[in-house]
Image: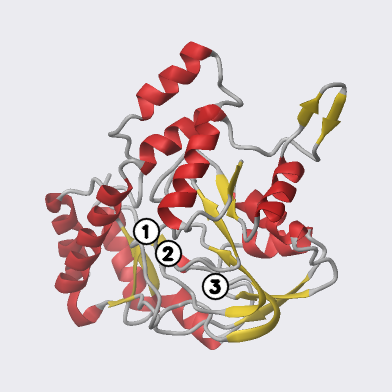
């Protein structure tokens, strides 16, 4: 099978994990600090980064730290359901808004709190009085906003085998996130709310992945540029809004209509090629519905070779 987007480990991940096993530091340890520091300095101008056990946890903690209980929070209709679940868990009210059609993301200024979602790695320029950027799949591909959340799930550009992070607006905010996500023993006193941290083993994998980030992003870009050049007018790629960037995490296109999408899906399945539909919109909006009914994501693992990509392109053209 040609997979949609699989993890690739070709760096020092095994060396770092072996060090954790050799020393016994598998839960806490220096790799957590090293990974957080690498993320902060490489992408976020030194802003504090706190790692946790998932992107969903990161978003939930960021909302709690901003104390949004009872508030109205704007999110796009086209997003993974975890975005809305985190708002509900924070006892806030969801305000669903339709997305922009060329880019598939939320655009504009919204009063109160807004959670722009960088869909498939494409940056969203939406802002609010408080902006919590859901950049789960957009590491290195969007601008730094007030607060950001990241995911390191298996299919992301870099992975820790599951995990996430909060990019924080201040040290005091980061301290609050740490207190909510860790149990810390201080003499006879135990502080903290829960055990939601990323482990030292996971951080070791993440650090090994980070050291290959530029090569991974360059591979994704090459794959995306070839698809765009060779699939022509029959498939419309997701656009990047002016002033935004993309890390090319997923390569996603719109087919001509729902029937065309179904033909492509059937052809890909017959050729043992994995593709993915967009999530069903969380509410009705004409743009979100149009994208959902016609969009597909195509294989774009960082190790996708030219021969396999040609197979995908040929299959798409045939359909």
Q: Is residue 301 visible?
A: no
Q: Are marks 2 and 3 in contact (CB under 8 Å)?
A: no
Q: Position of residue 225 (x, y in %)?
A: 20, 67
Residue name at image x 87 percent, y 27 percent? 189
Label 2, label 1: how far apart the Cα atoms are: 6 Å
Residue name at image x 49 percent, y 15 percent? 21
Residue at mark 1: 249
Left or right for 147, reference 189? left
Residue name at image x 38 percent, y 43 percent? 210
Looking at the rendered image, the disc whose residue lies closer to the viewer, 1 or 3, is 1
Residue placed most toward the observer, 211 or 123:
211
Q: Position of residue 230 (x, y in %)?
A: 14, 71
Residue at mark 2: 120
Looking at the rendered image, the disc whose residue lies closer to the viewer, 2 or 3, is 2
Relative height, residue 183 to residue 104 (above, below): above
Picture quarter with the N terminus: top left
Q: Is residue 67 visible?
A: yes
Residue placed most toward the observer, 7 or 288:
7
Q: Position of residue 146 (x, y in %)?
A: 60, 67
Task: Check disc 1: other Cα within 10 Å, few if <14, some if 14-19, many if 20+.
Answer: many
Q: Secondary structure at mark 3?
A: loop
Residue at mark 3: 78
Q: Secondary structure at mark 2?
A: helix
Label 2, label 3: how far apart the Cα atoms are: 11 Å
Q: Position of residue 188 (x, y in %)?
A: 87, 21
Left or right for 315, reference 182? left
| Sequence-first tag of 1 and 3 | 3
Tag count: 3
Relative height, residue 222 to residue 100 (above, below): above
Relative height, residue 280 to residue 304 (above, below): below
Q: Are marks 2 and 1 in contact (CB under 8 Å)?
A: yes
């Amino acid at each position: 099978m040609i997979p949609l987007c699989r993890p690739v480990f070709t760096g020092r991940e095994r060396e770092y994990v072996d060090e954790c096993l050799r020393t016994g530091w598998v839960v806490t340890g220096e790799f957590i600090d090293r990974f957080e520091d690498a993320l902060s300095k490489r992408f976020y101008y030194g802003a504090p980064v706190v790692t946790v056990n998932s992107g969903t946890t990161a978003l939930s903690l960021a909302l709690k730290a901003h104390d949004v209980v009872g508030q109205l929070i704007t999110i796009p209709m086209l997003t993974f359901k975890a975005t809305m679940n985190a708002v509900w868990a924070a006892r806030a009210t969801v305000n669903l808004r339709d997305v922009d059609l060329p880019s598939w993301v939320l655009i504009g200024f919204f009063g109160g709190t807004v959670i722009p979602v960088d869909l498939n790695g494409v940056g969203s320029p939406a802002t609010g009085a408080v902006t919590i950027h859901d950049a789960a799949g957009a590491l290195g591909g969007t601008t730094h906003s007030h607060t950001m959340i990241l995911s390191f799930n298996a299919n992301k550009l870099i992975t820790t085998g599951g995990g996430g992070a909060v990019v924080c607006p201040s040290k005091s905010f980061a301290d609050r996130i740490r207190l909510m996500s860790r149990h810390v023993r201080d003499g006879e006193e135990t502080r903290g709310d829960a055990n939601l941290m990323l482990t030292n083993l996971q951080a070791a994998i993440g650090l090994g992945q980070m050291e290959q980030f530029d090569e991974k992003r360059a591979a994704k870009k090459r794959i995306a540029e070839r698809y765009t050049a060779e699939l022509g007018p029959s498939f419309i790629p997701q656009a990047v809004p002016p002033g935004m960037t993309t890390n090319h995490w997923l390569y996603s296109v719109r087919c001509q209509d729902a029937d065309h999408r179904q033909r492509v899906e059937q052809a890909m399945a017959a050729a043992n090629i994995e593709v993915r539909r967009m999530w069903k919109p969380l509410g009705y909006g004409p743009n979100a519905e149009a994208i959902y009914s016609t969009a597909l994501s195509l294989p774009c693992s960082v190790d996708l070779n030219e021969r396999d990509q040609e197979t995908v392109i040929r299959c798409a053209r045939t359909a």
